[in-house]
Each structure stands twice: as structure tokens, then as C-alpha cells.
Image: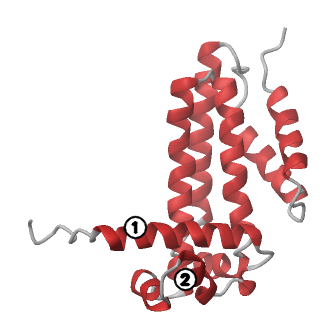
Amino acid sequence: MSTTEAPRMRADAARNRTLLLATAREAFAAADDDTSVSLESIARAAGVGIGTLYRHFPTREALVETLYVSELDDVANAADALLAEHTGFDALRLWMDTYSHFVATKQGMPNALRAAWSSGTLRMSDTRERISGTIGKLLAAGAADGTIRADVTAADVTDMLVGIFVATRDAKDQSRISRLLDLLVDGLRPRA
């Protein structure tokens, strides 16, 4: 191993880290705000000690930032797998559900995210760029296979998604969000 390579994480440590992130994701998604989610409760629900949590995430902010970046990667990378199995239109609609879950988790961590954005460790512009790039890829595939109008831009869809999530911020009703997403994508179908 060269001196520039990061040491590999032991298998049990990697498993604990993955488990802590999954548990934190569930806790923040269910919360109305991050002050109601304690690190101790995350460790307990993950079945590990608080020391294990702190070894992986020395601060609450470190946990939130890692969770955010990990989920953003998952959302952005989901498009390729969906496009491998679905039309552009269907892949876009399925991807919107993945993105909706990402947004729901973020609604449970507003204070920690504001702190990360203020410090510059996370940047909203980077998130928007990645989301718009992913939407652009899905739109291009739909335009190419004839399932999505060719005159729609990634910025158009990103703006509409933001509108839906702002309008449903307090709504825990996934069926309402799903109905609004269905209406959005129906408007993307090619004109007859």
C-alpha cells in the first residue's frame, strides 16, 4: 500500500458505519427537526455503543454531512440503473420517488444542514448542479426514446420539483407527493 492511500476499514467497522448511516437516515426522515434526534438514540437503534458512533462521526455535523453526501450520491447514481431497465419517462418517474425520499430525510435535519451550508462544507449550488445533471440525463434518454418531450430542460423540471417539495413541506402524506409528481411527469409526455 502506498503512503497516499487511505487505510482500508475493517469489515466490522465498515458494517457499523453503514448501519449507523442507515439508522440515521430513518431517524431524520421520521423527525420534524434534527433537535429531536439524539446521537445516542441513533447508536442504540443501530445496536452499537456511542463510542462507535463517535469514532465514525466525531460530531453531529460530521454525521449529517456524511449522510447528505452519501444520499446525494445514491440519488444521482440511481438514474443509470433505472435507465438500464426502463424507458426515459418511466426511469424519470421512478427516480423522482428516490429524490422525494432524499428530500424527506433532509426535512428532518434543517438545523444541521443550515450549519453545514453556512460553514461551506456543503453547498446548495453543488446539490442543484448534481440533481439538474441527473434530470438532464433522464430527459435526454426520454427525448431519445420518444417518451419525453424534447423541449423540456433540466432547469424546468428542477424548478417544478422544488415547487412540489416546498408546497408539501409539512405533508407527511407520500400519496399527495406522489400524485403531484405524477401530474408533473404527465406534462412531460410528447404532444400528440
Above or below, 177 against 112 in this view is: above
150 lies left or right of 57: right
80 lies left or right of 156: left
SS category of the residue bearing label 1: helix
Q: Which amino acid, mark 1? A: Arg
Where is residue 139 drawn, in percent x and y? 64, 29
Closer-to-camera residue (57/183): 57
Where is residue 16 drawn, in percent x and y? 42, 73
Q: List the residue tagged with mark 2.
A: 43
Mark linked to residue 116? none
Whichever of callouts 2 and 1 sits on the residue coming sooner in the sequence is: 1
Which residue lies at the image location 56% right of the left edge and 58% below the top edge? Answer: 71
179 lies left or right of 36: right
Distance in Å between CA atoms under marks 2 and 1: 13 Å
> Residue 156 lies in what quarter of the image?
top right
> Residue 143 lies in what quarter of the image?
top right
Q: In which quadrant is the N terminus drawn?
A: bottom left
Above or below, 171 against 21 in this view is: above
C-beta proximity under 8 Å, tags 2 and 1: no
Closer-to-camera residue (43/77): 43
Q: Which amino acid, mark 2? A: Ala
Above or below, 159 against 84 in this view is: below
SS category of the residue bearing label 2: helix
Closer-to-camera residue (25/163): 25
Q: In which quadrant is the C terminus drawn?
A: top right
Closer-to-camera residue (118/170): 170
Q: List the residue tagged with mark 1.
A: 15
